[in-house]
Image (cartoon, rainbow, N blue to C red):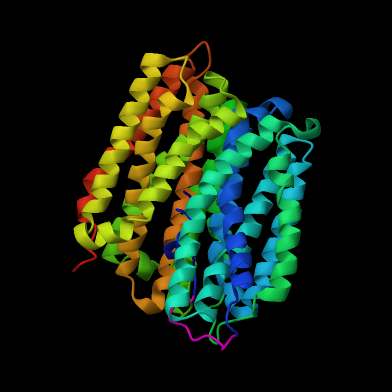
Amino acid sequence: MTQSVLAPQTTPQTTGAPAAAAPGLTSAGLITVLLGAALPVIDFFIINVALPTIHTDLNASTATLELVVAAYGIAYALLLVVGGRLGDAFGRRKLFMLGLGAFTLTSLACGIAPTAETLVIARAAQGASAALMLPQVLSTIQATTSGERRSRALGLYGATGGVSTVVGQLLGGALVAANIAGTSWRPIFLVNVPIGIIGLVLARRHVPETRSVNPMGVDRWGTVLLGVSLLTLLVPMMEGRALGWPVWCWVLLGIFPFAMAAFVRVERNLERAGGVPLLPPSVMRMPSMRRGLALAAPFFTGFGGFMFVYAMTLQDGLRLGPLGSGLALTPMAIGFFSISLMSSRLVARFGQRVVLVGAVVQLLGIVVLAGTSLLAWPDLTPLELAPGMLLLGIGQGLAMTTLFRIVLSRVPSDRAGVGSGVLTTTQQTFLALGVATLGSLFASLSAPDSLGLRDAFVLVLAVQAVLTVIVSVMAPRLPDPRD
């Protein structure tokens, strides 16, 4: 669902840029690059069912657990566009193998992390590695296939994201529950090591090298300033409450507006000088992009916060355990995957109204989930949670995939890669912001001397419901892709 997050439309590429001739992509090569597309999605979701176990094993606070989740997304958001441009310039197979190798090593570092702080650092490095690897997948498919073979490859690429969300939930729950040799949550990361090694061997043999004839440059200052902006905002929001709001939190929050202003100025100046910024102001000013980003902000904030809070509620509140939590999350992934396969036909027939319908269905799912929680707590089972979660997944599948498709359909073809980079960076940023804000709200309200877990969970659902209403109000203002 972050890919939902990894759907073809969201990956930066140099659409429209000439590419060097390359050998065709064999079936083995396609399987190899799709493996590279699956791993980042699996690891985005696999962590959810392990959070309470990590909390117990490493004595990690809720704020630190938020960082474990958000560090991955922040690094991914910052470097995804950079990774695509480096692949275009230096060779996509080379960057794919570099990213996969780094992903394998950082997964090992996550799996053997002795402290929660070490795990946060390793997760950030893992997200950065994924950002180097993932953009090469779609770029390689585009450069080495054509016609019907390309269509099939792109279809498999899109399906990989949906399947990976289901695999991430179930595999994570099964591995943590198995407690292999007393290793608890660590196999969810260590399993990537043999898979990554096999992927590297296959990539060397079966993935052809390609690169762009006219690659875009890397916006170094823009990347640094956006990173400073995100960190000075998100870190104090996650850690401030738990630490009693020390002075350094307020200092970082004070730096944030200045860092953001410097970022905007650098981006404007670079574009005026003829460069291609990380987030080009001219692309962000396009009516379709501006409206799409405005809608994406509340949507992904709610989604990011929900995934963190729901994972904590399942195990800390309902005591379902890792495997039960994985099963309880699976209906949403199945609903998302199933409906996303139909979204192209639905958009062709109903246009931007699909986003509105998706928001309404998601709102209905939130209401059902909140009502079920209030009525049956604390004896909820995955089966009782399934109707609300299934509706949530269907609504998200309708809204999220359609949003990317509609917004990018209005971006000129020679700027499609830049536009998809803007959307994906925005998506990952607000996912992290959702974890920071709603996760902190849940942590402060779920204590026994406050509302308690049930009411804190329902209150977070109410906040997500408000954000979903905002999405539904804004959805009709999106352009109609049929025009």
Please name the predominant secondary structure of the magenta segment in the image: loop
Which residue in the rendered view is the most extreme toward the top?
A: 449
Q: Is residue 268 in view?
A: no
Of 313 and 439, the residue lying toward us: 313
| Horizontal relation, residue 290 to residue 350: left or right | right
Give me the residue at 59% from left, 81% from top.
211
- Locate residue 8, reporting x and y percent: 45, 64
Name which residue lies at 21% across and 67% down. Answer: 482
Q: Residue 424 at x, y = what percent? A: 46, 58
Residue 90 makes an appearance in the image:
yes
Q: Which residues are magenta?
A: 14-22
Residue 97 to residue 338: above or below: below
Q: Quadrant of residue 334?
A: top left
**406 magenta-colored:** no
Q: Nearer the viewer, residue 289 or 211?
A: 211
Of 468 and 243, which appears nearest the observer?
468
Horizontal relation, residue 80 to residue 112: left or right: left
